[in-house]
Structures are given as C-alpha cells and as structure tokens.
Image (cartoon, rainbow, N blue to C red):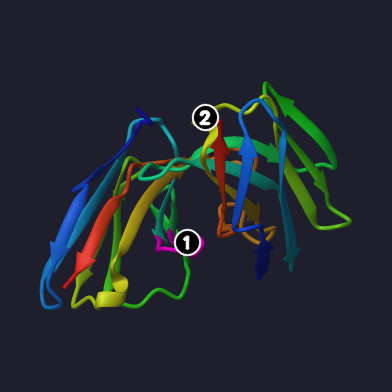
Amino acid sequence: GQNIDQPTEMTATEGAIVQINCTYQTSGFNGLFWYQQHAGEAPTFLSYNVLDGLEEKGRFSSFLSRSKGYSYLLLKELQMKDSASYLCAVRDSGGYQKVTFGTGTKLQVIP
Amino acid sequence: ETGVTQTPRHLVMGMTNKKSLKCEQHLGHNAMYWYKQSAKKPLELMFVYNFKEQTENNSVPSRFSPECPNSSHLFLHLHTLQPEDSALYLCASSLDRPSYEQYFGPGTRLTVT
C-alpha cells in the first residue's frame, strides 16, 4: 500500500516562491504525479517524476528523491490564480494504472 | 474543456433509488477510472478499466456497480446508497502507459438523502 503526506494548507504572497512538500511510504513505486485542483473543478496534470532530480516546466518545477521517499512542487512568481489545492499522487509498481493520492495542500495566494 | 465529460453534474437521490452516472472520453484513451472525493479526504480510487476489462476494484461496496461497454464510455450504477456515499465522483481516462497522466472529468456531485 501507499501512505502519502502533504501539508494541509499553505499561504504565500503574490510574486513569491512556494515549495509544497510530499513524503510517501510505499510497497512499490513507479512514478509520482502532481495535480492542481481549483475549488469545484477537476484535477489537472502538472508534472510527472519517475527518476531522481528536478523537472522544470515554466513557473512550476517538481523534484523527486526516491531514496528519501520525498518530492516537492516549486511554484515561482506566484499569481493569484495559483490559489488551488495541489495533489501529490504515487503510482504503484504492481499495477501501473493504480495511483494513490494524498489529501492535497490547499494553497492561498495573497496580495 | 478536458475531453472527459460526465453526466449528471449534480444528483440527489434517496437511499432506495437506483441511478447511474455516465462518463465519456473523446481522447482516444484505453484506460478509464472512477474516483470518489470526499471533504478532507484524498481521492479514492474505486475502479479501473483497461481496454474495457476491469483491472482494479479497490474494495468498493457492491452497491456501486461499474460498467464499461467500450473504451470511450464508463458508467457507475448506484443502488441502495448510504448518506456517507455523498461525495464528488470523478471519472478519469489515460493511455495505458506508466508515464501518461490521467485526464479528469468535471465530476458528479452526489447527495444521498
């Protein structure tokens, strides 16, 4: 099984940088996803990491350390529209379609 | 527009009713999923279908019955639900490869009275 931990809430200032952490304990691992979910909307894909290191995509970057069971999502130049929940999800090695989600981190961006 | 549609968007049903949720994907994906999202809980995977075959049933009560007639359509049949089944039910689809992300529909907000 999978156990995924993320902070419940975070607040950051417009224009700043924020890092959202995710730790996981798994019986198997085959990749980690980050999704963004605005209130009342469906989750949308942000990033995928399967090897150690940093993946950069515009203002968003995601980092993975498999040995530490740790990932973070880095959001730069925060905008008000970045206020949303950020979901960390781990893919099980047993069945590659089986993805376990964390409870999500609700980020509030303030002026 | 995500390419995954769900109907209805809102549903209120009594515990003795029978209803069905529908999901359709227009993305050419092979795998489809049902998730349950309750307040302050993580997304819970319920069922996975790959090429119309059920590959995961995550210990879901039998009052939830999935159906996948083809790779583009997925149904969730509901009967004799309980109030604690009230939640947002999300459908998703993906290609059947590990690195491919899931695309989610807008969800059906279900209230059981």
Task: Specify the quadrant of the image occupied by residue B20.
Answer: bottom left
Q: Secondary structure at mark 2?
A: helix
- Residue found 26% across the figure and 55% down from its top: B109
Q: Which secondary structure, mark 1? A: strand
Residue at (74, 45) in percent of width and height: A72
Amino acid at pointer 1: Leu
Going by the image, does A97 lie left or right of B15? Answer: right
Q: Chain of mark 1?
A: B
What residue occupies the far front of the structure in this picture? Answer: A111
Q: Quadrant of the N terminus of chain B?
A: top left
Q: Which residues are magenta?
A: B37-47
Q: Visible in this render: residue B90?
A: yes
Marks 1/2: CA–CA distance? 30 Å
Q: Is residue B23 depicted above or below B19 in this figure?
A: above
Residue, disc 2: A80
On residue B45, which mark appears?
1
Where does the image place residue B16, in percent across and percent down from the top left?
11, 78
Q: Nearer the viewer, mark 1 or mark 2?
A: 2
Q: Chain of mark 2?
A: A
* Residue at 55 percent of width and 60 percent of height: A103
Name the residue furthest top: A58
Rendering coords of residue B19 (x, y %): 15, 63
Q: Residues within 10 Å of mark 2 (few under 14, many from 20)?
A: some
> Label 2 amino acid?
Met
Dividing the picture into quarters, in which one does residue A48 lie?
Answer: top right
Place of residue A99 in the rendered image (x, y in percent of width and height, measured from the top left): 58, 55
Badge 1 vs badge 2, beta-carbon distance below 8 Å: no
What residue do we see at 45% from left, 75% from top?
B59
